[in-house]
């Protein structure tokens, strides 16, 4: 990926704004004429306004909000070699939002030479975890060795039940790692008996069980700091736990982009890696512009009909 | 400064190298009691840690000892800066002492613990005398100073976890409150519940349906008959059915769960009896559709578009189908009233419906209409719990702020009451 | 089938067969091992994405096909996951040495408790409950499954109650004890530090007040034992405003999430399937 261009005058912005502008002007005209707009037109419009910036990529500067920065700073402040647990609690439906966060957090931890223990509370998390291991760890950090710098405990069925047990005893639920290596033989797990022995647990997910359950079953009773990356849908409900019970939160693609941007600011090497969060923020922003415009158009139409009715009465 | 450091590290490297043949790797300190005093006499070993204490870890299931100490005077300063502390353990004051872990410089606590299974790695049996010693170690692992040995100390489990007292108090308070109000409700006490706007909206909507000569659609959601929101929904269904019977409008109740369907049939039948029109009740008012989430949505949406009900009522447990249902209903031009305790779905109902019972309002509406002791009692108990929360929050904020303004510490003491540890 | 439907079906089949061949050739050039399979998988994902999106135009048989495929596959996936992770992963290693060997799972003998008893025997309880649950399939003995359900409901309720009491009740109460006059150092100091940045004193103070009043008024809105009139009514009114703002935020976040999914799909179609962006 090329260096980030952060000006508003990127070709992508101009082309997309032109496309969107024409569409909105047409819709406004129809609205003022009082024409009923078919839903399919709206769908097609949204599709086009998202597709244009995908074809002509746009990147914006994404300033981190305090809540996202808090997680970044926490990982930044941990001393080298700290043991961090990362839990993959999401499925492919959430992957476009959550996987970029997961990759960014893993990159950051490895850059800081932390030791990572991966687990999955969702069955589908396992295969997404493998994507991170193959596409990020194996490519960008080939020097990191399994068993010494990271280990993968894999998926365990039981949802909250698993968390309830591993907060006091990790081995009871995970006697072996994903390759059937007994935990005693894994160097990185030396001295780890339960989740309480990690300096930080990052839960990535948005459903149930997810970050909330990690707080309820592990963070609070075990006194372990919990950080979370979550799908946008469940982000508002997690805000209530910040900052006491949740040290930081990445919400939706915006959160991912914020984290990626912080990484790029801090470490030169990450300026050249793919940053899907930042890449997606372009189409995302334009789609939001369109939706805001729709809300305004809708209100114009509503006021029109109300005035008409009022006039008739 | 720099040349001196380099010389020192070179010297220590050389000494380390000369010992390398006979010594085990330096990362794993020898499992002996030998106090490895500085092998280069030119460097003063660091000061030892002071006030070392070993205690049984509080509020746990045993198998754990917590050590605490004051850091070495050379922690973070001096030529022989302490980079880590290595913790040694033995079951006899004379040793031999084994290394059980290490802590980074600056640390002042360490927990020596094991899993409770006797075959666990490094198992720590309860009620055994243990002795501890901590070495302050410099970057050169051979330069270290041991502390004095502390002990004996025994680990043991506790029956009661002091740190969780606030939870116990809250559970007891809420539990007793619930029992008390349940008992009062069962005894038929007159417990006041304020009227809710949503209920009046239901009545109005039924009136409108009658005027238009169109049916009313009642959706109980995807919950099972044991979900509290479905139970609340049955009561509201009873009320709606009674009004429908009085106005002689038509009612449609498509169901997702067969048991829910059976209960709903009974509810509607009873409501028609109540209204004095048992003959108007038809079995096919309440029927089973399918047990597949989106299949159910598709079918209900079909009913909305074909039969064009004047009013749609959604009460109960809803998931992703909430918006699909409410949006179709809005398109069909029906008046819509909804209520659910699924927080994530409320926003969708709010935008697409004319009136929404938010969260507990659903229970309150049901308790108000049905006066069912279980619902009424728990609603009252919740009300009093909320009052307690409001009072605590007010007192807490007041205490904290007055104390902060007058630099007193007692404001923080109040906060301590709510502190759950462990 | 109408003539139009036949023509559409043929076009779709030809298009995606072409895509399979093309993607396979592309993968072969790139030196991928299973290039036929890779080509098929990419084409298949693209087909299913478009099939689901076609619902936005109109309900159609291609959409129905994709939907049923999804339902069927996910049901099968969860069933096999359930078997391999719960029965093979959690249960068998604790109950049978020979079966653990057969499934290549490390056997976990548990602890001997004296006499005939081993700690692992407690795992027969879930086995029995599991069998009871399966009684649902019988119309005559279906009621037995309620015993297992009662156990599940009871234990989860108990477990959740304590956790919620702690994390969502007690911890949240003490979270509302916020300093309402943040580091109050006199009015002059306050005005000289006026700033709208998130670290500014004004913002910190305003947000603390919102948290404090929001919690109080939100609770008052859900207080049913008193008529909402007078000051109480005003507080409840403010409470519902706060609630509505929350719902709005939640709705906005949801829209953002849905758009992200669309961006993800469009990126897949354009980059991985059509290859028109890098």
Image: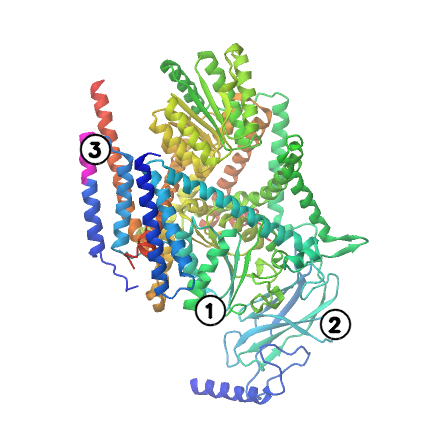
Quarter of the image that includes the N terminus of chain C: top left
Q: Earlier in the sequence, mark 1 or mark 3?
A: 3
Which-is-in-front pick, marks 3 and 2? 3
Kind of element beneath mark 2: loop
Spot occupied by residue B127 in the image (x, y as percentages of width and height): 75, 61
**Residue B350 colored in magenta in the image:** no
- Crowding around mark 1 (Cα neighbors within 10 Å: few <14, some 14 to 19, many 20+) is some
**Residue A28 colored in magenta in the image:** yes
> How far separated are the C-alphas under marks 3 and 2?
88 Å
> Can residue B144 be seen in the rendering of this structure?
yes
Mark 2 lies on residue: B92
Q: Residue C190 carries which label?
A: none
**In the figure, is residue B71 to the left or right of B338?**
right
Residue at 22% of width from left, 28% of height from top?
A304
The residue closer to the viewer here, C248 or C96, is C96
**In the figure, is residue A271 to the left or right of A132?**
left
Mark 3 lies on residue: A31
Q: What stretch is highlighted in magenta?
A: A25-34
Spot occupied by residue A102 in the image (x, y as percentages of width and height): 43, 57
For the image shown, how many numbered marks are present on the structure? 3
Colour pattern: rainbow
Kind of element beneath mark 3: helix
Kind of element beneath mark 1: loop
The residue closer to the viewer here, C15 or A36, is C15
Mark 1 lies on residue: A113
């Amino acid at each position: 990926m090329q260096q980030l261009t952060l000006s508003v005058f990127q070709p992508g912005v101009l082309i997309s704004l032109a496309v969107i502008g024409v569409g909105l002007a047409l819709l406004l005209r129809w609205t003022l004429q009082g024409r009923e707009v078919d839903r399919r037109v709206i769908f097609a419009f949204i599709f086009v306004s998202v597709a244009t910036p995908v074809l002509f990529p746009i990147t914006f500067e994404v300033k981190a909000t305090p809540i996202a920065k808090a997680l970044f700073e926490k990982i930044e402040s941990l001393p080298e070699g700290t043991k961090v647990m990362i839990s993959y609690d999401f499925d492919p439906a959430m992957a476009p939002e959550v996987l970029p966060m997961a990759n960014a957090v893993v990159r950051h931890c490895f850059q800081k030479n932390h030791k990572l223990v991966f687990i999955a509370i969702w069955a589908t998390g396992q295969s997404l975890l493998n994507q991170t291991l193959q596409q990020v760890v194996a490519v960008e950090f080939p020097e990191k060795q399994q068993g010494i710098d990271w280990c993968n405990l894999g998926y365990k069925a039981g949802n909250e039940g698993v968390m309830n047990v591993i907060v006091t005893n990790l081995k009871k639920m995970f006697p072996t790692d994903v390759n059937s290596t007994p935990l005693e033989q894994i160097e990185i797990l030396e001295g780890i008996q339960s989740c309480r022995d990690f300096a930080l647990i990052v839960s990535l997910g948005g459903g149930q069980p997810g970050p909330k359950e990690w707080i309820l079953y592990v963070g609070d009773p075990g006194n372990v700091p919990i950080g979370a990356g979550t799908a946008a849908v469940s982000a508002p409900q997690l805000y209530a736990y910040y900052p006491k019970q949740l040290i930081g939160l990445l919400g939706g693609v915006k959160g991912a982009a914020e984290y990626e941007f912080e990484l790029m600011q801090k470490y030169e090497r990450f300026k050249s890696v793919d940053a899907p969060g930042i890449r997606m923020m372009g189409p995302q922003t334009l789609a939001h512009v369109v939706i805001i415009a729709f809300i305004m158009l809708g209100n114009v139409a509503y006021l029109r009909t109300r005035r008409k009715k009022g006039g008739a009465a | 400064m720099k040349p001196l450091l380099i010389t020192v590290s070179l010297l220590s490297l050389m000494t380390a190298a000369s010992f390398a043949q006979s010594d085990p790797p330096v990362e794993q300190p020898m499992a002996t009691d030998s106090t490895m005093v500085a092998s280069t006499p030119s460097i003063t070993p660091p000061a030892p840690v002071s006030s070392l204490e070993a205690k049984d870890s509080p509020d746990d299931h045993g198998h754990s000892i917590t050590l605490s100490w004051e850091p070495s005077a050379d922690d973070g300063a001096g030529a022989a800066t302490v980079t880590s502390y290595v913790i040694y353990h033995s079951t006899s004051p004379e040793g031999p002492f084994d290394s059980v872990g290490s802590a980074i410089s600056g640390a002042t606590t360490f927990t020596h613990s094991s899993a409770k299974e006797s075959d666990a790695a490094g198992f720590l049996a309860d009620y055994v005398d243990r002795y501890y010693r901590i070495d302050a170690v410099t970057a050169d692992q051979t330069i270290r100073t041991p502390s004095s040995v502390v002990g004996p100390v025994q680990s043991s489990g506790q029956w009661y976890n002091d740190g969780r007292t606030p939870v116990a108090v809250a559970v007891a308070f809420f539990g007793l409150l619930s029992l008390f109000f349940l008992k009062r409700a069962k005894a038929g006490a007159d417990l006041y519940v304020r009227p809710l706007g949503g209920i009046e909206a239901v009545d109005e909507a039924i009136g409108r349906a009658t005027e238009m000569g169109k049916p009313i659609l009642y959706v109980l959601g995807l919950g099972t008959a044991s979900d509290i929101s479905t139970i609340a929904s049955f009561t509201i269904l009873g009320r709606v059915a009674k009004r429908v019977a009085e106005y002689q409008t038509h009612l449609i109740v498509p169901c997702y769960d067969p048991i829910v369907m059976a209960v709903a049939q009974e509810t509607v039948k009873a409501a028609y009896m109540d209204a004095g029109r048992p003959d108007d009740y038809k079995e096919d008012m309440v029927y089973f559709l399918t047990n597949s989430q989106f299949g159910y949505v598709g079918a209900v949406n079909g009913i909305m578009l074909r039969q064009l009900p004047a009013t749609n009522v959604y009460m109960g447990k809803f998931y992703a189908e909430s918006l699909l249902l409410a949006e179709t209903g809005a398109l069909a031009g029906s008046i819509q009233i909804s209520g659910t305790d699924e927080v994530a779905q409320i926003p969708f109902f709010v935008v697409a419906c004319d009136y929404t019972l938010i969260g507990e309002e659903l229970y309150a509406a049901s308790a108000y209409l049905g006066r069912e002791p279980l619902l009424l009692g728990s609603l009252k108990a919740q009300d009093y719990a909320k009052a307690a929360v409001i009072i605590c929050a007010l007192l807490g904020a007041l205490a904290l702020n007055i104390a902060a303004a007058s630099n007193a510490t007692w404001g923080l003491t109040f906060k301590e009451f709510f502190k759950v540890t462990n | 089938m109408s003539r139009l439907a036949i023509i559409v079906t043929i076009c779709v089949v030809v298009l995606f067969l072409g895509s399979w061949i093309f993607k396979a050739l592309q993968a072969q050039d790139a030196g991928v091992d299973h290039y036929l399979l890779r080509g098929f998988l990419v084409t298949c994902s693209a087909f299913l994405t478009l099939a689901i999106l076609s619902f936005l135009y109109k309900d159609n048989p291609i959409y129905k096909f994709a939907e049923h495929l999804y339902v069927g596959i996910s049901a099968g996936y969860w069933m096999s996951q359930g078997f391999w992770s719960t029965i093979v992963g959690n249960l068998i290693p604790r109950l049978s040495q020979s079966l653990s060997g057969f499934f290549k799972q490390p056997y976990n003998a548990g602890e001997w408790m004296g006499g005939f008893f081993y700690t692992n025997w407690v795992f027969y309880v879930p086995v029995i409950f599991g069998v009871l649950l399966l009684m649902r399939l019988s119309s005559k003995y279906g009621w037995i499954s309620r015993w297992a359900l009662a156990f599940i409901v009871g234990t989860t309720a108990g477990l959740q109650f304590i956790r919620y009491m702690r994390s969502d009740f007690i911890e949240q109460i003490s979270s509302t004890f916020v300093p309402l006059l943040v580091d109050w150092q006199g009015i002059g100091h306050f005005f000289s530090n006026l700033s709208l940045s998130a670290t500014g004193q004004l913002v910190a103070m305003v947000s603390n007040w919102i948290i404090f009043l929001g919690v109080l008024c939100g609770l008052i809105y859900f207080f049913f034992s008193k008529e909402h009139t007078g000051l109480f009514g005003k507080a409840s009114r403010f409470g519902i405003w706060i609630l509505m703002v929350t719902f709005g935020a939640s709705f906005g976040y949801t829209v953002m999430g849905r758009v992200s999914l669309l961006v993800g799909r469009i990126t897949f179609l354009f980059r991985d399937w059509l290859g028109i962006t890098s």
